[in-house]
Image (cartoon, helix red, strand yellow):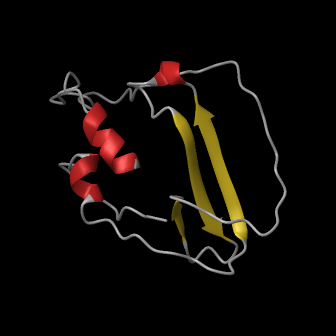
Amino acid sequence: MRSVPAQQKPYPALAEVAKTQPVFELSNVTGTLVGFRAPPFVKGLNVPGYHLHFLADDRQSGGHVLSLTLESGTLELASYTLFQVQLPAAPGTLAGLDLHKDRAQELKAVEQ
């Protein structure tokens, strides 16, 4: 698993943050695994594929799941037909951001 520490403004790019993120393993832990599968058409808005996060029952550990072995569990699935993006409404929230830069390669490296 990995867990990116809290960031301060001006926020660095995810690729920079990922260089120093802690990566760790948990064993014999019970908790909740939550995730979603994003379809290929959301590329550019999200990362296509599976995205999983884990939170231990004691809430002392958790993070982005890189791989897992599950001894037992309960699986619940839901299907969604709506994909909605809501941008921040506060004045100046997106001001000054370069949203034209293609970060596909950076994101691919981080998600590997």
- Front position in the image: 7 or 107: 107
> Which residue is painted at 71% across and 68% down in the image?
31
Question: For this rendering, which residue is in front, 82 or 108?
Answer: 108
User: In the figure, 41 relative to 75: above or below?
Assistant: above
Residue closest to the far bottom: 28
Image point (37%, 61%), residue name: 4
The percent coordinates of residue 61 (x first, y second) are 55, 74
Q: Say how many tags the image has.
A: 0
Q: Is residue 59 above or below residue 51?
A: below
Query: Which residue is pictured at 84% across the width and 57% down the height?
Result: 74
> In this rendering, would 100 be left or right of 47?
left
Q: Position of residue 68 (x, y in %)?
A: 61, 63
Specify whether 6 is left or right of 19.
Answer: right
Q: Position of residue 112 (x, y in %)?
A: 40, 50
> Residue 83, position in %: x, y?
58, 21
Answer yes or no: is residue 52 visible: yes
Q: Is residue 85 visible?
A: no
Q: Toward which corner of the image does residue 8 lie, by quadrant?
A: bottom left
Q: Nearer the viewer, residue 51 or 56?
A: 51
Check the image and report above or below for 20 versus 103. below
| Quadrant hosting residue 51 | top right
- Name which residue lies at 66% across and 51% down: 34
Q: Residue 23: name its quadrant.
A: bottom left
